[in-house]
Amino acid sequence: MVVSRTYVDEVDKLKKSGYRLVGAHSAVKICHWTKNVLRGGKHCYKNWYGVESHRCLQMTPSVQYCNMMCIFCWRFHTINRVTIYEGEWNRPEEILDGLIKEQRQLLSGFKGNPVVDRKLFLEALEPKNMAISLDGEPTLYPYLPDLIKLAHNRGMTTFLVTNGTNPTRIQELIDEDAQPTNLYISLYGPDIETHVKMCRPLINDSWVRLNESLRLMPSLDKSRKVIRLTLVKGYNMMNIEKYAELIKLAKPDYIECKAYMHVGESQKRLPREAMPSMKEIIEFAQKLSSTINYKIVTHDNASRVSLLADESSPYYLLDSNRLSSVT
């Protein structure tokens, strides 16, 4: 295979940004919150669901391969955003050990840091959660069910984040008994017009596919299910009633109202003013809460997230000791 100069440049850019590539299409990167915990700081807001940031493997089995070009995305939008991977996909057994090995290498510099707790450092070398969310659209990876089952067999939890445009893969997770511990479906607009404006999809039927995934969501009875609203001021913080209609299709256990953050490559596409304040996120969450029967249970100021929960869900306050009170 002839490797283009453009591809080499893309790989170099990813490596300079802290990515470590494994195999032909997978990657790992140390999360800001992993570093934060090792230095004595707080966990990320996913600690609500039992995820310890320093023991989280932030990875992707489809680095750069995505079917959308979302304007708020902090990742690089390179040539792979508009092409389909035509090589042979690596099997999960070929990549998981490599990802953990690369993560340990990335963490090695913390070993001699005097502010790093040695116990936390040693724990970080043995990740207990796999966040399938780093880059690209993970449901494009054909062996996703096998990857999730492999992680579970090794005693890891899994956190899958998807844009919902591949309902066939979500159905496979159900059929093959490979439901992730946590399933996120991201919802970026209340209607097709906003969806297209925000996501700039590279497929013609993304809105139809997303709605199909939302209808499938209640069938995942072994996953904690979350709808994430990435809210961009002046772009998609309207028509709460339409958001509510979509959420009723999915019947998630939780809803996250999360502010767009003006970081990474998104700074080239959006103004800083598009980043909502925590106050604006809370106000949006309160309006949504009054529209549907979900209770606001907590907020995270650092990440600008408000969490709503279905009080009838079997997962309601499953990790209540991790949830700070809401005033």
Image (cartoon, rainbow, N blue to C red):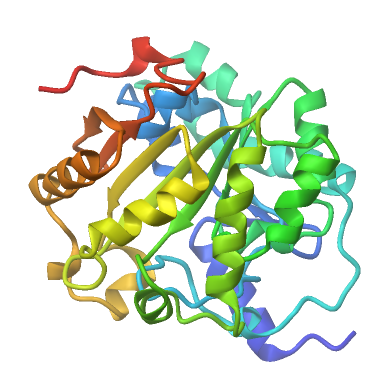
Left of 47 or right of it: where is 214? right
Is any part of residue 185 visible from this angle?
yes
Please give the name of the residue rendered at 26% of the width and 68% of the height, measured from the top-left corner: 236
Asked where in the image residue 36 lies, by quadrant, the reply is: top left
Q: In the rendering, at what x and y percent does residue 51 appear?
A: 50, 26
> Quick one: 107 or 151, which is closer to the camera?
151
Please give the name of the residue rendered at 62% of the width and 31% of the height, measured from the top-left corner: 223
Please give the name of the residue rendered at 71% of the width and 51% of the height, measured from the top-left corner: 170
Asked where in the image residue 79 lies, by quadrant, the reply is: bottom right
Left of 215 or right of it: where is 231? left
Is any part of residue 44 visible from this angle?
no
Specify the quadrant that holds the N terminus.
bottom right
> Quick one: 28 or 50, which is closer to the camera?
50
Please give the name of the residue rendered at 48% of the width and 40% of the height, measured from the top-left corner: 251
Q: In the rendering, at what x and y percent does residue 242 appear?
A: 32, 61
Q: Looking at the image, is 227 positioned above or below residue 46?
A: below
Left of 62 or right of it: where is 230? left
Q: Looking at the image, is 189 positioned above or below residue 155?
A: below
